[in-house]
Amino acid sequence: MNALEFPILSLMTYLPLAGVVVLALLPKESKGAIRVTALAFTAADLLVSLWIPAYFDSTTAEMQFVEKVSWIPSLGVTYFFGLDGITLWLVMLTTFLSVITVVCSWESVSMRLKEYYAFMLMLETGMLGVFFSMDFFLFYIFWEVMLVPMYFLIGIWGSDRRLYSAIKFFLYTLFGGVIMLLGILAVYFYHGAETGTYTFDIFELMKLSYPSTPVFTLLGVPFSFQDLVWLAFFLGFAIKVPMFPFHTWLPDAHTDAPTAGSVILAGVLLKMGTYGFIRFNLPMLPEATQHFVPMIMILSIIAIIYGALVCMVQTDMKRLIAYSSVSHMGFVMLGMFALNFQGVQGSIIQMINHGLSTGALFLIVGLIYDRRHTRQISEFGGLSKQMPVYSTLFAIIMFSSMGLPGLNGFIGEFLILVGAFKVSYVWAAFAVTGIVLGAAYMLWLFQRTMFGALENPKNAALPDLNAREISTLVPIVIMCFWIGIYPSPFLSRTEMSVNYVLARVHKQAVAEEPYLSDSTRPATGPAETGHESGGGAAAILPVRAPASVHAEGRDLNTVERSR
């Protein structure tokens, strides 16, 4: 069988679930075997996932590694898995961090170990399922199932107010998910009424242009069917990001979650909100997207500045890093809704950067918490003398989070600022203040904990990092330098998918529509390099035509003009 025909996406999704079955067969007293089994299955999933970038075709925007079979024909439900440039690095980030979380929990978790690792493996299955699902019914199942293991990870293995934080996380996300479901059902029934075919296939649903004519006015603002569906999706995804003012669950969940839970929460779960926007809101509902750009920009800038300011008054290290996520995810949303190539591509790469740097910061806090059982900044000082390896790795991750040139954070922030500036220099100016404030709170945290006199006697005998602990941070540090110094492999594989999304947002013709017929393509002219649309939207690069077009010996523009 050809490697591209093998159901590799299903294998990746359910391999961790097979690990849960194996764990269930192990006696709970065999803690060593439980740890090794969890590590073996997550590591195997990471190894399998390496085939994805190896075989990924960066010259097309089409879905790749597609698995599609009819599942519930009476409802129009298909088992539809696929992957493109938008999801490629999010999937790789998921499998990469899953291994890290198993290793970082090796000694810090001993209570109910079998259940703990079972929930971690179930969570990995849920996350991968969300990214792979191209059928709304399947997507929603994985979206909701994913809540269960995270709820138990916080509620059982968390600290302090873990039950309160777990319930708050669950209710917030469940509420957003239910509202999102209403939006899914709205497009499902509208498509059925218009075409006579009821389907949850995302690309079939994208064939229609949903009504953008206002149906009612609220407080002087007109709303159409498309606007209402967009807002239903917005609420579900904005809570997950989380955007201001839907962020209040995040500091509690992060603070009380175990270290591995915080790493996965910051590294992957928050990205599902931003992924939802770029996968569904932008290409499916383009008029509504344009309509709500000012609202998103205002909320993003508030999140950038508010999150940074709140960080500067925190006394708990974990809570400080939690609020920094609000600020960083504001940057992601700002770039995405600049609706130009640089902004959206910067938004995607910044999702990965945030997952690496903030996930590593939570590991840093977890390592010192295991030694001192406190996260209060006032309890530390002068640790660089006692723990030089720890402080060195902390410094690298701190500079990565700040966006220092040569590290990954710089690439994402630079592209986002370029994208924002091309639309409005005012937006870019406000975003820059967030970068300055971000440097201030990170340097303040590092100075208070690593420098100064080693005055607290409880810190005088703290051991430096051992080999296992170093192994959890060094791979992330390597990735931070790789993306910062040579980002081309990461950016090139997202380029065509970004072009495709932007072409749909600006209602331009594209050379290839994944699973859409020619008759459904927009009737306007082809996207061309340097084209600008609507209020300063930046250049959209042309989407490459399928091989069949070039095989006929005709130029893409000629093909489009002949239609």
Image: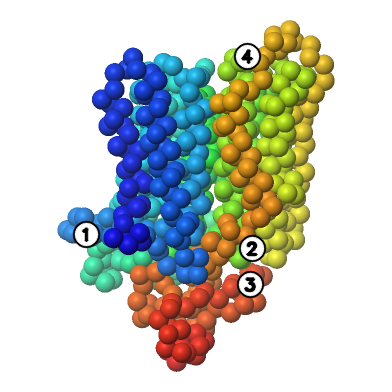
Q: CA distance from mark 2 to mark 4?
A: 44 Å
Residue 530 visible in rendering: yes
For disc 1, the marked residue is 70
For disc 2, the marked residue is 342
- Quadrant where the N terminus sits is bottom left
Seen at 80% across and 23% down, the residue is: 451
Q: In the rendered image of this protein, does residue 144 appear above or below residue 59?
A: above
Q: Which marked residue is nearer to the observer: mark 4 or mark 3?
A: 4
Give left or right: position of 223 versus 444: left
Q: Which marked residue is nearer to the observer: mark 2 or mark 4?
A: 4
Q: Position of residue 453 (x, y in %)?
A: 82, 16
Q: Residues within 10 Å of mark 4 (few under 14, many from 20)?
A: some
Q: CA distance from mark 2 to mark 3?
A: 8 Å
Seen at 62% across and 26% down, the residue is: 365
Mark seen at residue 544:
none
Q: Position of residue 487 (x, y in %)?
A: 64, 56
Q: CA distance from mark 2 to mark 1?
A: 38 Å
First-in-chain label (4 vs 3)? 4
Seen at 69% across and 42% down, the residue is: 400
For disc 3, the marked residue is 539
